[in-house]
């Protein structure tokens, strides 16, 4: 029984809901689902991409009735209850075209080999007497068997003309294997989304360079580039922009014109030196607060007609923003990347605290480790700078808006990372 505590209805003043902001991101990126973005690629290059159109099977799978076992192909009506002796015909190896099965005979057949005309069942070699293959013309004793036993009928996987895959299916190994089994060598998929990724801030230094006092190394660029690349996006890094709005504008104009989307990190809050806000002053961009923790400050709009998303500057915040808004928007529009798999788990708070608390006016996303026994342990606190805790996590833990307290054993939704 859950012990979750719920807050009265309501939301932080002027905050947009997570669902509404996700819908706004989806609307912004809707042109990415245009059929003009389709391209035909070889199957190996389609991994992680999504189909533009549904596909009908051009042939049946399997294309012919075949044996599920090594054994003897038989006519079931030839074998009475109690079994009988049958004369052995020429063997049927996989890939061959067998001769028709004569009455009162059995044909040695290998797994995957075509069922001879006249046969309707297969007796496994282990049930034969003797339990090994004999030469043609000799006699084998076989037990009675029902029609269809160990026979894979033509089209039993998928018949010709049936839908093999739906439009916007994300193509993984199994889907590509199916297309290959159907004889296809290429497939029409959506063109990969090209993202210009820009980190902002005078305080940020590229890893590998000297670290002066008051500076930090840029983790956001690597974190988001890895997340986006893993999700199938094509990422272009434009380095680190200073806190000079004119320099940021120049960088975006020079690097962003051939991009499908611009994503920045940092500079979207209400502080005195929010460079992204300043650089977007004359662009149709909204800066707002979403009822999300971490990841509340967000920017959305277009820069010189290129779709733009401004994520917060703390590393966990920018990753949560990607997972909560950009990833699901692309999944909904074009089917790739595949959406995160939601699971239910029970909180394990041993050694931490007796309760998990959350602001009732926000959707809180915590980091955690899902264990084989179905419990999840929180990693770190709710702060958005805890990279070490994030690196030790394998799930995002969701505490919905309106829930203020959860106790050990309470059930939560988690997303596998």
Image: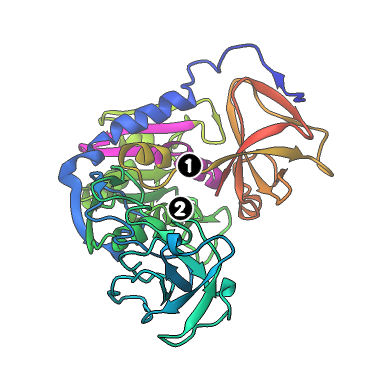
Residue at far bottom of view: 135
Residue at 36% across, 32% down: 25
Residue at 46% across, 66% down: 122
Q: Is residue 39 above or below residue 319?
A: below
> Can I make out residue 236 in this image?
no
Q: Nearer the viewer, residue 157 or 362?
A: 157
Q: Nearer the viewer, residue 390 or 171?
A: 171
The residue identified by callout 1 is 323
Task: State how the image is colored.
Answer: rainbow
The residue identified by callout 2 is 227
Q: Are marks 1 and 2 in contact (CB under 8 Å)?
A: yes
Q: Position of residue 280 (x, y in %)?
A: 31, 34
Q: Is residue 65 magenta?
A: no
Q: Is residue 197 above or below residue 361?
A: below
Q: Position of residue 381 (x, y in %)?
A: 69, 41
Q: Which residues are magenta?
A: 297-326
> Can I make out residue 146 in this image?
yes
Q: CA distance from mark 1 to mark 2?
A: 9 Å
Q: Is residue 304 magenta?
A: yes
Q: Is residue 112 above or below residue 405?
A: below
Residue at 54% across, 54% down: 215
> Which is more N-terminal, label 2 or label 1?
2
Q: What is the number of the mark on residue 272?
A: none
Q: Position of residue 273 (x, y in %)?
A: 44, 37
Q: Secondary structure at mark 1?
A: helix
From the viewer's perspective, tell me whether residue 283 is left or right of residue 175.
left
Q: Position of residue 251 (x, y in %)?
A: 27, 50
From the viewer's perspective, tell me whether residue 42 is left or right of residue 20.
left
């Amino acid at each position: 029984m859950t012990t979750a505590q719920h807050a009265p209805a309501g939301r932080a003043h002027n905050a947009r809901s997570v669902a509404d902001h996700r819908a706004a991101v989806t609307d912004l990126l809707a042109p990415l689902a245009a059929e003009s973005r389709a391209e035909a690629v070889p199957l190996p290059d389609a991994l992680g991409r999504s189909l533009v159109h549904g596909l009908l099977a051009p042939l049946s799978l399997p294309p012919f009735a075949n044996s599920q076992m090594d054994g003897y192909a038989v006519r079931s009506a030839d074998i009475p209850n109690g079994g009988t002796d049958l004369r052995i015909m020429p063997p049927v190896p996989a890939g061959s075209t067998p001769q028709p099965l004569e009455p009162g005979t059995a044909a040695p057949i290998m797994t995957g080999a075509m069922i001879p005309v006249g046969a309707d069942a297969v007796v496994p070699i282990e049930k034969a007497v003797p339990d090994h293959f004999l030469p043609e013309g000799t006699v084998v004793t076989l037990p009675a068997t029902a029609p269809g036993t160990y026979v894979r009928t033509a089209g039993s996987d998928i018949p010709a003309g049936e839908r093999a895959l739906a439009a916007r299916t994300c193509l993984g190994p199994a889907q590509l294997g199916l297309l290959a089994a159907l004889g296809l060598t290429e497939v029409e998929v959506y063109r990969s989304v090209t993202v210009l990724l820009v980190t902002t801030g005078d305080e940020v230094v590229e890893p590998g360079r000297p670290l002066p006092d008051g500076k930090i190394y840029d983790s956001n660029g690597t974190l988001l580039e890895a997340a986006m690349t893993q999700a199938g996006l094509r990422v272009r890094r434009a380095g680190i922009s200073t806190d000079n709005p004119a320099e940021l504008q120049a960088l975006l104009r020079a690097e962003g014109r051939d991009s499908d989307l611009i994503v920045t990190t940092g500079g979207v809050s209400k502080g005195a030196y929010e460079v992204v806000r300043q650089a977007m002053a004359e662009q149709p961009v909204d800066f707002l607060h979403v009822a999300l923790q971490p990841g509340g400050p967000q920017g959305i709009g277009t820069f010189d007609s290129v779709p733009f998303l401004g994520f917060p500057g703390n590393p966990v915040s920018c990753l949560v923003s990607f997972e909560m808004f950009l990833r699901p928007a692309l999944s909904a529009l074009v089917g790739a990347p595949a959406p995160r798999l939601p699971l239910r788990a029970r909180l394990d708070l041993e050694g931490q605290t007796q309760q998990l608390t959350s602001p009732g006016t926000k959707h809180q996303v915590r980091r955690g480790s899902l264990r084989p026994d179905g419990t999840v342990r929180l990693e770190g606190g709710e702060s958005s700078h805890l990279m070490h805790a994030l690196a030790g996590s394998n799930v995002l833990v969701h505490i919905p808006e309106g829930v203020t307290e959860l106790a050990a054993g309470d059930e939560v939704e988690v997303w596998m990372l």
